[in-house]
């Protein structure tokens, strides 16, 4: 018996009912075909000089921070460091675009974003030196813990943003993730919930070319990562991730939209990871030096420095002042990181739960007794 021969076949329609139709017009959600740029274009004339100088000082400081943190791994003061050299424009713009009341949800590579937001550089590196817990109070700084598992910070950002919206709090969450994180299920779940709930959250994807050694072409066949936004019903933006002014502008627009109740935005910042994935990685096994050198020519500091110099906003004295401030920060970081931390084994039980469970209390008592016995033996 065919479908047409079934009872009620006259009512059969070969096309789906109207419910299949898009809930939103997809055209406005699609990103531009090329990454948006400001520096070196006519749009640069309208950029705020004071903002550009702030971005420049933060970029110079950020580059020195990356170099110093990498050196600390070679000195045994850090267990590991995922450098963001080459990506400083994304890191700095993310921090400066946020309001004080907003929340930042960083990945493990985003220590610079946390520092640019005002976190003590030593506290930002505490987790990476193997010290206790996060190293800072997330609530105090409005910075979630640096997230080592890929993309798990994204649903957390959505949850906080949704809760803030339900409470009527004027708060936006900015969640940072790498291109590798977009291949995780948490990425899909976060974007889907964010769009359905119209949560005030912005997703910044730093597409630095590789998920450790896996190039983007082996992760996705999408035209761009920003194009993934339309599948969730949110706008996608494509921006030059080495253009600090462009990243700040695009982020600012997305954050303002979210704050007005317009919902989430997915931003893909096209950048490049100049250093290896971490100090434990040998990047020469999967990419050539010629590729790296080509991206060095598109260095975020050089791009902004050229713009400022051509506009007469930056001279040699200004460059020297920025470099000196960065060196002062690095010297302080080096000195404090070279001091051995005072470790208390009882910190294992601190800040795990708001109220300790019975099991934790039992374990803490056992450790306390062992430490006391060890002290008496001495």
Image (cartoon, rainbow, N blue to C red):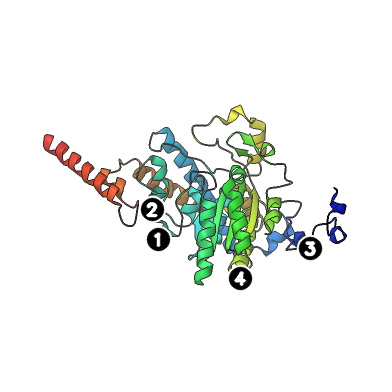
Viewer-proximal residue among 313 and 111: 111
User: Circles 2 and 3: CB distance less than 8 Å?
Assistant: no
User: Circles 1 and 2: CB distance less than 8 Å?
Assistant: yes
Foreground mark, 1 or 3?
A: 3
Foreground mark, 4 or 3?
A: 3
Residue 84 x %, y % = 54, 44
Q: Earlier in the sequence, mark 1 or mark 3?
A: 3
Residue indicated by mark 2: 136
Residue indicated by mark 3: 18
| Residue 324 as seen in the image, left or right of residue 201 | left
User: Circles 4 and 3: CB distance less than 8 Å?
Assistant: no
Residue indicated by mark 1: 140
| Residue 316 as seen in the image, left or right of residue 124 | right
Viewer-proximal residue among 9 and 213: 9
Viewer-proximal residue among 102 and 10: 10
Q: Earlier in the sequence, mark 4 or mark 3?
A: 3
Viewer-proximal residue among 53 and 110: 110
Q: Up-down: is 348 above or below 41?
A: above
Residue, x 68% and y 48% (percent of image)?
225
Residue, x 42% and y 56% (percent of image)?
138
Q: CA distance from mark 4 to mark 1?
A: 25 Å
Residue 322 x %, y % = 50, 52
Foreground mark, 4 or 2?
A: 4
User: Circles 1 and 3: CB distance less than 8 Å?
Assistant: no
């Amino acid at each position: 018996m065919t479908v047409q021969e079934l009872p009620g076949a006259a009512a059969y329609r070969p096309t789906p009912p109207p419910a299949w139709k898009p809930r939103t017009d997809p055209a406005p959600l699609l990103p531009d075909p090329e990454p948006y740029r400001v520096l070196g274009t006519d749009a640069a004339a309208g950029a705020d000089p004071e903002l550009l100088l702030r971005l420049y000082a933060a970029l110079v400081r950020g580059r020195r921070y990356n170099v110093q943190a990498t050196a600390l791994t070679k000195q045994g003061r850090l267990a590991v460091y995922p450098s963001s050299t080459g990506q400083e424009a994304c890191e700095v713009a993310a921090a400066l675009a946020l309001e004080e009341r907003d929340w930042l949800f960083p990945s493990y590579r985003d220590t610079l974003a946390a520092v640019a937001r005002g976190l003590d550089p030593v506290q930002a590196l505490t987790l990476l030196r193997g010290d206790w817990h996060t190293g800072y109070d997330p609530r105090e700084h409005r910075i979630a813990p640096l997230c080592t598992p890929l993309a798990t910070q994204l649903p957390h950002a959505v949850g906080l943003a949704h809760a803030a919206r339900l409470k009527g709090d004027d708060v936006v969450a900015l969640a940072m993730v790498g291109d590798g994180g977009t291949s995780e299920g948490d990425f899909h779940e976060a974007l889907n919930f964010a769009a359905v709930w119209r949560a005030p959250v912005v997703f910044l994807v730093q597409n630095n070319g590789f998920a450790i050694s896996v190039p983007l072409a082996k992760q996705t066949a999408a035209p761009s990562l920003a194009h993934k936004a339309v599948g969730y019903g949110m706008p996608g933006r494509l921006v030059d991730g080495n253009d600090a002014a462009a990243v700040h502008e695009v982020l600012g627009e997305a954050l303002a939209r979210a704050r007005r109740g317009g919902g989430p935005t997915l931003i893909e910042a096209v950048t490049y990871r100049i250093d290896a994935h971490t100090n434990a990685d040998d990047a020469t096994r999967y990419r050539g030096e010629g590729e790296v050198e080509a991206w060095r020519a598109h260095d975020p500091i050089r791009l902004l420095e050229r713009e400022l110099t051509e506009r007469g906003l930056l001279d040699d004295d200004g460059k020297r002042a920025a470099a000196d401030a960065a060196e002062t920060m690095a010297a302080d970081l080096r000195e404090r990181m070279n001091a051995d931390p005072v470790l208390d084994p009882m910190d294992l039980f601190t800040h795990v739960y708001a109220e300790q469970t019975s099991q934790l209390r039992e374990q803490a008592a056992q450790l306390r007794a062992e430490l006391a016995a060890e002290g008496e033996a001495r």
